[in-house]
């Protein structure tokens, strides 16, 4: 059941991302010969989301390449990372210390060696320095079609209202808010999801 819910969620995220990027149809995921980058954290719910996203994108013939920029702090013996080789064998995996606050866009580009049309950042927690800033700066440099950010519902100020509307005030000091603001300031085609686990 949990696996099925994740698959459905990932398909919805992909479809919504594409519509926001200007696609007129998502029935066949109109990604016309595109490359995709998934910036992947070290585990937890976000780790599973990135893995399922890679699996879904792998089944689309219009995606020419998929790369996961994987936080090297992940435990490769644990799921979903242990299933990379068998379940997503055609996905390129590049490992890096995503907690390194000195990482720049130039460093990231050297690691990856190419540009990407679509970028899903499933790892960054801020944009003042390090990988989060580097992802945004690379997306700008690459002229990517869309940056999708998997943020967190934890950025909202607590309220007793349920379901919580998207207009609920956010914590200005949250790193994810900083990330979203920086992406918008850069003028990127950008969408942010704020899941709650």
Image: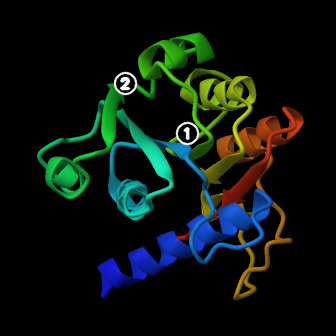
Res 52 visible = yes
Above or below: residue 18 compared with residue 114: below
Residue 92: give x, y in percent of width and height.
Answer: 32, 36
Return the mark for residue 124.
1
Which one is closest to the eye, mark 2 or mark 1?
Answer: 2
Above or below: residue 13 compared with residue 180: below
Residue 103: give x, y in percent of width and height.
Answer: 53, 15
> Residue beneath label 2, please?
96
Q: Who is closer to the viewer here, 82 or 19?
A: 19
Neighbor class of circle 2 (other Cα within 10 Å; few <14, some 14-19, many 20+) is some
**Mark earlier in primary sequence (2, 1):** 2
Res 197 visible = no
Q: Who is closer to the viewer here, 11 or 155?
A: 11
Q: Is residue 66 left or right of residue 191?
A: left
Q: In the rendered image, which quarter is residue 91 located in?
A: top left
Q: Who is closer to the viewer here, 176 or 14?
A: 14
């Amino acid at each position: 059941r949990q696996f099925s819910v994740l698959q459905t969620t990932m398909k919805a995220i992909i479809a919504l991302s594409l519509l926001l990027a200007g696609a007129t149809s998502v029935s066949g995921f109109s990604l016309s010969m595109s490359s995709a980058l998934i910036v992947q954290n070290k585990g937890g719910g976000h780790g599973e989301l990135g893995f399922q996203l890679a699996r879904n994108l792998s089944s689309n013939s219009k995606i020419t390449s998929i790369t996961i920029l994987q936080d090297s702090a992940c435990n490769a013996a644990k799921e979903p990372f242990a299933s990379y080789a068998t379940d997503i064998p055609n996905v390129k995996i590049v490992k890096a210390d995503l907690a390194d606050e000195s990482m720049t866009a130039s460093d990231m580009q050297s690691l990856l060696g190419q540009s990407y049309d679509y970028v899903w950042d499933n790892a960054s927690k801020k944009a003042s320095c390090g990988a989060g800033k580097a992802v945004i700066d690379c997306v700008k440099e690459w002229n990517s079609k869309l940056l999708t950010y998997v943020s967190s519902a934890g950025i909202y100020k607590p309220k007793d209202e349920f379901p919580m509307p998207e207009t609920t005030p956010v914590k200005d000091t949250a790193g994810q808010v900083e990330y979203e603001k920086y992406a918008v300031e850069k003028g990127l085609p950008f969408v942010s999801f704020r899941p709650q686990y």
